[in-house]
Amino acid sequence: MTHPDRLECIRCRESHPLEAYDRLCASCAAENVSSNLTLCYPVTAPPDIDCLPNAPNSLWRYDQFLPLDATEAVTLGEGMTPMIPVDGFGHGRIRVKDESRNPTWSFKDRLATVAVSWAKSVDAPAIATSSTGNAGAAAAAYAARAGLPCVVLTYKGAAGAIVAQMRSYGAMVLTVPEMGDRWRVLSAAVAKFGWFPTSPFFGPAIGSNPIGIEGYKTLAYEIAEQSDWIPPDWCVLPVCYGDALYGMWKGFDEMKRWGWIDKLPRLVAAEISGSLTAAMDSKTDMPPIVSRNSKSIANSIDVAQGTYQAHAALRHSNGIAITLDDEHLVRARNKLAIGSGLSVETSSAAAFAAVDELSANGVIKSGEDVVAILTASGLKDFGATGIEIPAVPDVVPDMDSVLRALDENYGYHV
């Protein structure tokens, strides 16, 4: 494989050394645009598609497009998650890319395996992240696999189940009073101790570590390979800072340049704040801050400002952003669980709510091929969504009591 030789600004294409993974583009910042960097590889002959049948059954089968060889990977068997047909959304049947099958039950494992593998290869002293949940759990698990210390900075409102998951891997989890405090502490630690950051840690946010974002390219490669190299018309996913959105676009773009696929899917960013929606409508580079009166139960994607990298992925793919509210998410989450047997994190339900809304509005047409990304398991946030689940009814051990309880509580008649 060919190793990366530099970083490049997503917006202005200015080159930066590989060691600049923890910085934004200063030239774009001078123009009031916070742009992330992305890895670049020397131009080579098109990669060999014929090698894939003998490649590992994990995302590292695509190591020719990643910054390290599979032999260097810190891996738990992540990737190659299934594509499941699901009825009842949009105009009928969609396909679900079920990322809850990853080792820590979310798509964040794709970023973590690449980021931690790189950190280990450069002898980083520790892994560090600021996270409300899934990213912290993934970083903790892969740091444990690599034998590296892991510090996770979160805030007091983080979901209890995911915090417990982080700590179960031995991560040193610390809470701070406000979400913004995490970044100040992490930024100082990266500068002073050389900890390897996997997440954003300064504002305005630009996205996560660009080395780790390369892992999300494998979502695109898997979707294409699992579709016999015929890409879908649409790929829909929940978006916070757009790491997976940009990584997926980059993966599809690479395949199109290599001639592996003949078109780019249109990407859809399902968001809460409306920041990306506003940027797409106004055609400005930097998504604005959009204030809301209350917090969303979709903790993983509840941010006031989107990123330039997410905006760029939408523009380059002729994609769109859609703004959703908690009612949309709860409805989609319940519909998916009861109708299809898939329990999803509330934030993940945004993708399915978006498919319904865009189909109803005529944006997604009947007959178009749609893939929705199920980003995380419903086990992640059952206790923190504010969704009221009725108590389980008590019965006495006789059939009349059982039948009466089924009728009165569940509307089930035998």
Image (tube, grey):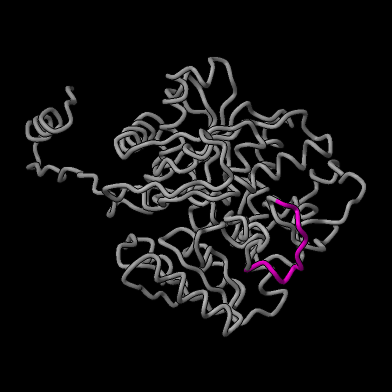
Residue positioned most to the right: 45
Residue 319 drawn in magenta: no
Would you place residue 109 above or below residue 249 in this image?
A: below
The magenta-colored residue range is: 12-22
Residue 59, percent across and down?
68, 52
Q: Quadrant of the C terminus?
A: top left
Q: Is 164 on the left or on the right of 125, as rendered?
A: left
Would you place residue 361 above or below residue 306 in this image?
A: above
Residue 134, percent across and down?
46, 58
Residue 20 drawn in magenta: yes
Q: Tell me, yes or no, if residue 268 can be seen here.
A: yes
The residue lying toward the viewer, choosing from 22 and 112, is 22
Q: Is 382 on the left or on the right of 106, as rendered?
A: left
User: Residue at 50% of width from left, 63% of height from top?
Assistant: 203
User: Dividing the picture into quarters, in which one does residue 19 lie?
Assistant: bottom right
Residue 231, percent across and down?
68, 30
User: Residue at 54% of width from left, 32% of height from top?
Assistant: 320
The mark tally for this picture is 0
User: Residue at 51% of width from left, 69% of height from top?
Assistant: 129
The residue lying toward the viewer, choosing from 73 and 154, is 154
User: Residue at 52% of width from left, 74% of height from top?
Assistant: 187
Would you place residue 103 above or below residue 49 in this image?
A: below
Residue positioned most to the bottom: 192
Residue 371, percent across and down?
56, 32
The residue lying toward the viewer, choosing from 230 and 84, is 230
Residue positioned most to the top: 366
Q: Is 329 on the left or on the right of 149, as rendered?
A: left
Q: Quadrant of the N terminus?
A: bottom right
